[in-house]
Image (spheres, grey):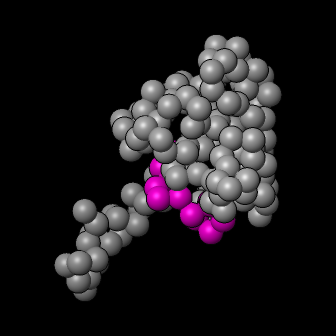
Amino acid sequence: RRLACEAQLGDQVLEIGCDRGGMTVQLARQAGADNICAVDKAKASINFAAKKFPFIRFVTADIPLNASGLLAMCQDIQRDKIKSNNAVRLHPFDKVYIDINGHRRLVDVKRLIEGVKRELRPSIIVVKSVHLYTEELKKQKKASNNKQQRWWELPR
């Protein structure tokens, strides 16, 4: 939740895996409710969030399984509100928050991150994933045990 402070007023923010909108409302406080699009695959969660926070845009979609069409889908989501000279912005979101909280395989998380980087090109991607975190810890432990490693490659 501390990473919501990375969103600033006016940023166009996409939250993937919004669940019932707990983090979404914090992002809306930072960036402005009109600048948030929150997505989750669970229709019940989206319905709950939309009723609780009617001033935020919630969309039911399974983005991790559709990463190849991510840009087109996001442009469609934002088409009615992000316009410049009657054209949709090429990359509609400045910041992307991914919170799939361990409910996806690691390969799917990595594929989603790569799709977001390649297609949306946000200035920042914040990822919450138990599997990704565990993998990074293992890499850091292995790197710190490697005596041949250069100082600039050490984990911080």
Placement of the C terminus among the 4 image quadrants: bottom left
Residue 65: which quarter of the image?
bottom right
Placement of the N terminus among the 4 image quadrants: top left
Q: Nearer the viewer, residue 19 or 31?
A: 31
Q: Residue at x 80, y 28 (%)?
A: 43
Let me know if residue 105 appears in the view. no
Classify 118 as above or below 54.
below
View extreme (front): residue: 85
Q: Is residue 75 left or right of residue 21?
A: right
Q: Is residue 88 magenta?
A: no
Give the image location of residue 121, x and y in percent.
Answer: 57, 63
Classify 91 as above or below 11.
below
Q: Residue at x 76, y 20 (%)?
A: 47
Give the image location of residue 61, x and y in percent.
Answer: 78, 41
Q: Is residue 124 magenta?
A: yes
Classify 143 as above or below 35.
below
Give the image location of residue 82, x and y in percent.
Answer: 66, 46
Where does the magenta region start and end? Answer: 115-128
Let me know if residue 43 appears in the view. yes
Q: Is residue 46 left or right of residue 124?
A: right
Q: Nearer the viewer, residue 92 or 65?
A: 92
Q: Residue at x 77, y 64 (%)?
A: 68
